Amino acid sequence: MKNYRHFNRAFFGLTIPGLLAVGIFNIGIDPYGVMNSPQWRLNRLRTEQFNHVRLFKASSVKRIAPKTVLLGSSRTDLGMDPKHPALADGKPTYNLGLVGPNMYEVRRYFDHAIANQPNLKTVVLGVDFFMFNEYKTNPADFEEARLERDSLTPQEWLNVTLSLGVTRSSLGTIKNSWRSQANFLYHDNGFRYVHNNEAEHPLPQEFQNMIHGFFREEGYYPRYKLSQSFLNDFREVVEICRSRNIDLQIFISPSHATQWEALRMAGHWEEFEQWKRELVAIAPVWDFSGYHSISSEPISEKMTYYWDSSHYRQEVGNLVLNRLFDYETASVPPDFGVLMTPETIEEHLVQIRRDRESWANANTEAIAFVEELKP
């Protein structure tokens, strides 16, 4: 018995202080930004947040309780600035864009925002075609249990303080902070930015990588079926906003013209148009897709409007917000942004087809660029 007592004392005497030390270390570094720990020299670049976006954004909404939220995909996440002057009346504002979500996920994070801020005032919702694909399943890091709560779940407390994974993330954060080595980082308001404002690869390669991934078997569009369930999620967001008198602004992301060409070459253009019809049957939608003065920017080593064929820069996001909120509209190109309604949708779709013909005739090299990437 004495031996057992000695063993237990030695075991717990070493284990408990060790666990406490690990927990304090991970809380201090806070690599995912969920503990609200201050940033200092060793954690100033929280590079691991990008790999845990669903976790840290759910946590931030609990803490901040924003009155304005920006919803959508990585295009919202990287392109829509919560500090835009048009949103000043609805502070605090938070960018709740996710990476690669379907519409169900977006709706659930919307529910989460309301649960933590019943007086939600404004919602800006960026919608993308892939978000409504029936084959777009929830990713592994989507957790229902963390939503519509005011604190982390017990399992998440363990994961962000004592797990081997978070310890590795803390060590990686220290290394990257010390070396000033980072690609994607986040502001406290959920807005993602590129460290040093430089793409990871030369821009033509970024375009090539994105479009090539568009066609891959594991990509978003090897097969597509418009999901009625995801349309119902969209409808629920619209109806909740109406019932709560929340100002809801909906827009389709302004990706580059080559992204729309890839969609066309993948054989989904008719489905793309039908998706727009289904959306406007539920609510008016601002359409920034298509072939206009912004999306037709030539691909080059230094671009003003795009990070790649899919993701637009803050400069474009600012123009979108200007249009949505009728703010400094003189700065917005006249062909950028059309409000689609059931009465205007068909004429608008015809105009996009015309715009595409004009663009294609003047941009044969861009079309060849996309064609070469198709399997």
Image (spheres, rainbow, N blue to C red):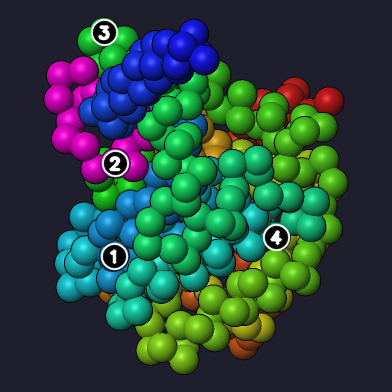
Give the distance between the C-alpha atoms of the residues marked 3 and 2, in whole angstroms: 24 Å
Q: Give, as a three-letter code, the residue at label 2.
A: Met
State whether residue 311 is above or below residue 247: above
Magenta region: 31-44
User: Disc 4 vs disc 2: which is toward the camera?
Assistant: 2
Of callouts 4 and 2, the N-terminal one: 2
Q: Where is residue 142 in the image (x, y as percent from the top left)?
A: 59, 48
In the drawing, what numbered circle is on residue 35? 2
- Mark pair 4, 1: CA separation: 28 Å
Callout 4 secondary element: helix
Q: Distance between the residues labelled 3 and 1?
A: 34 Å
Q: In the rendered view, does 46 fall on the left or right side of 167?
A: left
Please say if 122 is above or below 352: below
> How far apart are the two marked residues, 4 and 2, measured between alpha carbons?
33 Å
Q: What element carries label 1?
A: loop
Q: Position of residue 280 (x, y in %)?
A: 62, 79
What is the C-alpha distance between the residues marked 4 and 3? 40 Å
Q: Quadrant of residue 67?
A: bottom left
- Specify whether residue 120 is painted magenta: no
Which residue sits at x=40%, y=67%? 113
